[in-house]
Image (cartoon, grey):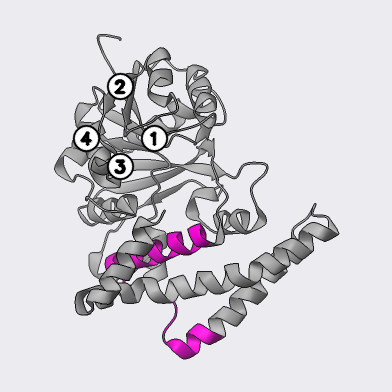
Amino acid sequence: MPDRVDVTIFIPTKNAGPEFVDVLDALDRQDTALQTELLVIDSGSRDGTAELAVSRGARLLTIAPEDFDHGGTRNHGIREARGEFVVLLTQDAVPVDAAWLDAIVAAVRDEPRAAGAYCRQLPRADCDPFIRDRLSRWNATQTERVVQAIDDPAAFWALAPLERLSQIAFDNVASCVRRSVVDAHPFEQRRFGEDIAWSRTVMLAGHTIVFEPRACVVHSHDESIWQAFRRVYMDHQNLHELLGVSLVADWRHLIKGCWGGVGFYGRIAAETPGLTRGQRLWWRLYGIPYGAGQVMAQYLGPRSTRWRKRSRLFRCVDRWIVGRG
């Protein structure tokens, strides 16, 4: 390990699978003069992930699976980091070129007010059409560099909820943070969305967030109908708590939205290039429960923040949804 460390690359892992090899290979290919260390916190892998990390030069820490928390574990890694800049990477996000590390670190280092920066994400070649469409509408897949700032908090809170989300977008799939800022404003312990919560906090405190598309990773993973429902439920639960997002006003809009969701995903199936006739039929049929489930999750997620306080039954339902990954 070098005497001086400029950058710590931190990856939380659990049963990372074969994609982790691609991540480690991409890190080995980085063309940089920065002094780096690789830090891994593993939470109970049984597939050789921890041993692989050590064999590739990582400093390994281990925690119990039940101790993992998206915010808390990242705070732990940042506290252990030796670099002032800490690159946060998931175990399945693969840097696309040898300039990735320099680009994402420079995005923070060269912007004096920057608390952090996040990378552009490209879907995998075999990504399913519904996930590919969702990613295309997320800030982290765009091509223009953006420096995000909140210069007037009152004006920020006067925006529509989705406009607030766009202004504070941040994604820990592949990001870089300034350790001194995290020391002052640590990530919240959250079961989902620690990155957006942190971005809101540091931007309201006067820092900026940079979207740097020159730093790019390949990242996507297909989901079952249930997994997609659960993700959207938790996402909209989180966004309602943080920003007041609530896209489905009442049960009438819910019914209308379910029909609209089915039609929306049917159009994606019809318009996605490269699908055979059989594949188009499959995705059109799959889009019926998928589309209805997405709208139902958008309806239930925001309401769960109230219903959990009022109903023991719904608290049990909420725990079941969130815990059944």
Give neighbour class at mark 4: few <14, some 14-19, many 20+ (Cα, 10 Å): some
How far is disc 2 from disc 3 in space, using C-alphas?
29 Å
Amino acid carrying mark 1 in the image: Lys
Q: Nearer the viewer, mark 3 or mark 4?
A: 4
The residue at which mark 3 appears reads as 114
Near mark 3 (Cα within 10 A), the count class, few <14, some 14-19 or many ≥20, is many
Q: Mark 2 or mark 4: which comes first in sequence? A: 2
Q: Residue at left 43%, top 42%?
A: 173
Task: Name the secondary structure under disc 3.
Answer: strand
Q: Residue furthest left?
A: 184
Type of residue at label 4? Answer: His
Mark 4: secondary structure:
helix
How many angstroms separate mark 3 from mark 4 (CA)?
A: 21 Å
Q: Please report the bounds of the magenta region as a residue range.
A: 226-255
Is 296 located above or below residue 178 in the figure? below
The label nearer to you, 2 versus 1, is: 1
Q: Residue at x 23, y 57 (%)?
A: 204
Residue at 67 percent of width and 76 percent of height: 263
Name the residue that disc number 1 marks: 14
- Residue under numbered circle 2: 60
User: Residue beneath label 4, please?
Assistant: 76
CA distance for labels 2 and 4: 12 Å
Indicate yes or no whether the magenta region holds residue 149: no
From the viewer's perspective, is the residue at label 1 or at label 4 nearer? 1
